[in-house]
Amino acid sequence: MILFFFFSSVNYTLVGNMFRKEMLKKIFHFKLLFEKISTKRLRFYCVLLIFIYVSLPFRYASKYEYIPDEEIKYHLMPSRTPGAESCPIVPDLNSDMLPVNLVTEYDEVDYGNKLNVLSGGAWEPHYCKYVHDVAVIVPYRGRENQLKSFLHHIHPFLQKQLISYRIFVIEQTYVKNFNRGKLMNIGYVEAMKIHNFHCFIFHDVDLLPLVELNIYGCTLKPRHLSASINSWRYKLKYSTAFGGVTAMLQKHFIQINGFSNLYFGWGGEDDDLIERVILNNLGYCRFSPDISRYYMMHHKPEVKNPKRLTLLSAAQDRLKTDGINSLEYEVLLSQKKSLYTHIVVDV
């Protein structure tokens, strides 16, 4: 069973439904074969081989195409035409890695006042006109310390980039398994009720950006921001990885019909999203590994979605019917807090 769960968690690149079906058959055949093994020693060696494989660096996508640092400003899409009084598209920022301080004990009101954050977690620069107008959508449930550390880290990080932003924390009740994709869709819809945001950053609460040059603005193509995470040895997990933190123009998010609403439990919704991006011929991009570095805060694994591979195999068939246009939810609480807009929903 150990091997079965290991292989079922593998994310496969987009090469068509026929390939996926064949891979699913092989996985289940391998599961049946493994269950016939009765010798404890043989099982031990099989598990040991898996551990060795997981530990080896070649299992990661060590190289990927990225936008050269000197060309980033030409790929970013400002929300308004830059003028003489505009903030720079790419400010003069530090390229070194930021220190990680997991601060959880602080007064949010005092901290917000210190940083001049407006009620609801909004901020914009005052001595220049912003060119990036961003909504940061954070799906959330039951990780209070991570949320406090994230907010303490992300506000000064974003302000150094001289962008206009607002942070939305979308909290799901405990009635059903966690649905990251649906919460992202809800965040988009609720944010648009407040302001016509040009750019959306979809952001896991456990990830902290480590390099200031990782601009939280949208590019010509949808962008995968968190390509180099410490828990993956600062390597890209696989070539089409699109989870963690992503940025997308409003028009592109509408074009792909947002995330799927069907992935309850961990895994699959990010691979479904990249398939939507590719099927709509939008392409995608990343910044360099040195810029795309993130620190992942430790947490217990979420409950896995046992249907994720089945859902992925039919992802392209649901593109036009499963997403923003089929979204159903109930808002239980909507509140402007000192550092974020808090929206509690039942999905």
Image (cartoon, rainbow, N blue to C red):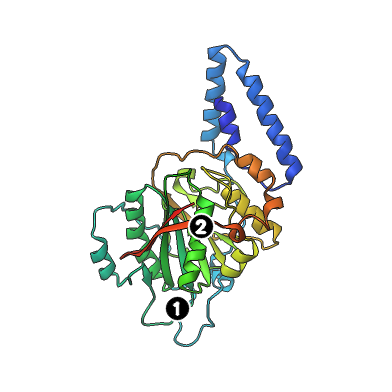
**Residue 93 drawn at (x, y percent):** 41, 69
Q: Secondary structure at mark 1?
A: loop
Q: In the drawing, what numbered circle is on residue 130?
A: 1
Left or right, 242 with reference to 214: right
Look at the numbered discs 2 and 1 and tell me whether their residues touch, using CB distance below 8 Å.
no
Residue 163 appears in the rendering: yes
| Residue appearing at x 63%, y 40% in the figure | 309
Amino acid type of the residue tagged 2 in the rendering: Met
Quadrant location of the N terminus in the rendered image: top right
Left or right, 221 with reference to 334: right
Near-viewer residue (321 or 119): 321
Near-viewer residue (106 or 284): 106
**Residue 45 drawn at (x, y percent):** 55, 19
**Earlier residue among tags 2 and 1:** 1
Q: In the drawing, what numbered circle is on residue 184?
A: 2
Q: Secondary structure at mark 2?
A: helix
Disc 2: CA contacts within 10 A as few (<14), some (14-19) or many (>=20): many
